[in-house]
Image (cartoon, grey):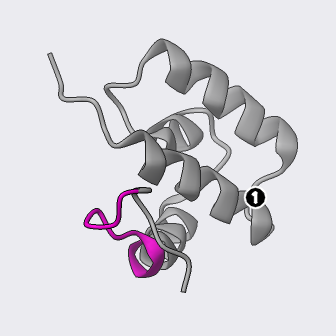
Amino acid sequence: MSQPTDPSRDLLFGLLALQNGLIDQGALFAAFAAWTRDKGRPLADHLVALGRLDAPRRAAVEAIAGVHFNPDISSGFHIN
């Protein structure tokens, strides 16, 4: 069985993708619904599997999330 991903990072990923216009609300909702049933896969995997996000856009959101995500901060991420 796969290890669950960090929910804070998954939620940040989804919000950043939406905020940057790479997905719409419907895509986020569909991926979130799939992710709540299978949290062993990152939210990004669900967006890709649903055909709502391609590899280059996923990489862009991952890079943005990496700038903001800091597991040493108690909230799980930090917005600079």
- Screen quadrant of the C terminus: bottom right
Of the pair 28 and 68, the residue shown nearer to us: 68
Image-quadrant location for residue 31: top right
Provide residue 4's location: percent of width, then percent of height. Answer: 27, 30
Let me know if residue 70 is in the magenta part.
Answer: yes
Q: Residues in magenta?
A: 66-74
Q: Is residue 21 found left or right of 45 in the rendered image?
A: right
34 displayed left or right of 23: left
Residue 51, x across and y down, in percent:
63, 40
**In the rendered image, the vertical position of residue 55 relative to residue 31, given as above or below:** below
Residue 27 place in picture, x, y as percent: 76, 39
Camera-side residue of 54 and 79: 79
- Asked where in the image residue 74 lies, by quadrant, the reply is bottom left
Q: SS of the residue at dot 1?
A: helix
Residue shown at the point (85%, 44%) measured from the top left:
25
Q: Residue at x 68, y 56 (%)?
A: 15
At 51% across and 62% down in the image, what residue appears? 58
76 left or right, relative to 65: left
Q: Does residue 34 sit above or below 19 in this rendering?
A: above
According to the picture, the residue beneath numbered tag 1 turns out to be 18
Q: Residue at x 47, y 76 (%)?
A: 68
- As drawn, 80 above or below 22: below
- Three-letter residue code for mark 1: Leu
